[in-house]
Image (cartoon, grey):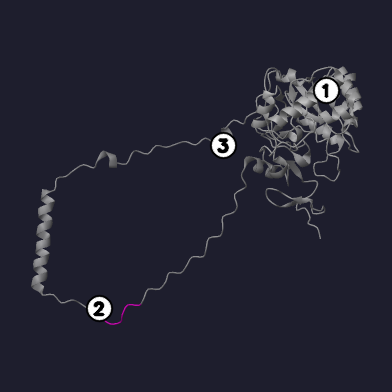
Amino acid sequence: MSELCPRHPQKAARGRCAECRRPFCARCEFLTDRRLFCGPACAREHQRGRRPAPPPPPSPPARAPEPRSAAPSGPPRRVALPRALSAVGAAAGIALTIFFFRRAPSRPLPAARRSPPTTAVARLPSESLPIPERPGAVAASRPFSEAPAREPSLALPAARPTRPAPPPNAAKTILLSFDAGSSDRGAASILDALAERHIRTTIFLTGQFIRRYPELTRRVAEDGHEVGNHTFDHPHLTTYARDGRQRTLAGVDEAMIRRELEETASLYLATTGKPMAPLWRAPFGEENAEIRQWADRAGYRHVSWTHGAGTNLDALDWVTDPDSPRYRPSERVVSRLLAAARPGDIILMHLGSDRSDPVADHLPRLLDGFSSEGFRFSTASELLGGGTK
């Protein structure tokens, strides 16, 4: 018999919390850092790097004192001493005590041994400490995980961690970026929605996408979008998929990174007659300082998306399996992005997806929603200015 969720006993459990190991159902599940939790509280404890303190172990029962060995029966023995010897010893002891007491001078206690005066220290109540407000965010170069949606079942905490400082041109500006890799399903609808609203954005293309869909690639260029490099074969670059750490994979070196970027740029130039922007985005979000440095020397700066500090703006529109814990219906994907995005944020979406419920059909609602809130759409170069991401 399958486990039941302790919060919703009528629902079967889908897994166990990565923090407290309690079972949870689909209604309770909370995904962050590619791990599932039973709620936001356990997710925050996991991000802080500590678990709730376990209850102290019960103290062992007090041991009864061992009985002392019984004293031997009978009256105690006395050592008989001559009374005269006892009297002489007592008189000598008294005389010596009086002699040394008179010769010893009275000394004050050294200053170093005197106890310092006690000082009272006032403690401020915790309520008086200021809570940092949430400024605009910029993208962090870390692997993706799902951001909490602003819904009753996945409510955000009242005080969220402070985001990094916004990019130079972040005032009421947002970057709705797209990655294009294996599929073109929905790509035409996405480009149509952007063109109808005269929105110019940044799209990252792989070499394989350019080779498979040259007409679509030419339309991206003709519509005036900024095109960045997403490598040629979309390979794994770090060990994150294995162990959750961003260590460079064996066989990944500077020559490989340069080859992946330069072959993609050459194919794009041959297909469209236009050069790529000197920007790139690592496949799967797998990168580290070493890999970014190799790409920098090849002439490319890295552009990630906003995640970390309690927020992740990966739309997860690439998840095609409805049974996956990361899968979200398209309407919920759009609602989550509208609720979570802030000025200066970078959103990650995909130009094509094989979902049965494509997010591309709901893109007009997302674009119009941001416009109604006063957001201006930007490219990566415009948003980041001269900075590096």
Q: Residue 254 colored magenta?
A: no
Kindly identify the amino acid type of the residue bearing the numbered disc 3.
Answer: Ser
Please report the residue visible at 12 percent of the width from the left and 53 percent of the height from the top: 100
Residues packed near mark 2 inside 10 Å, few (<14), some (14 to 19) or many (20 plus): few
Q: Residue 71 colored magenta?
A: yes
Task: Indicate the quadrant where residue 260 lies.
Answer: top right
Residues packed near mark 3 inside 10 Å, few (<14), some (14 to 19) or many (20 plus): few
Image coords of residue 372 (percent x, y): 83, 22
Vertical side of 371 occupied by 185: above or below:
below
Q: Are marks 2 and 3 in contact (CB under 8 Å)?
A: no
Please report the residue visible at 73 percent of the width from the left and 34 percent of the height from the top: 285
Image coords of residue 36 (percent x, y): 74, 45
Kindly identify the amino acid type of the residue bearing the numbered disc 1.
Answer: Tyr
Vertical side of 253 occupied by 19: above or below:
below
Along the line of sight, the residue nearer the viewer: 222 or 86: 222
Sequence-first tag of 2 and 1: 2
- Secondary element at tag 2: loop
Circle on res. 76:
2
Instruction: Report the residue marked by disc 1.
Output: 268
Along the line of sight, the residue nearer the viewer: 199 or 125: 199
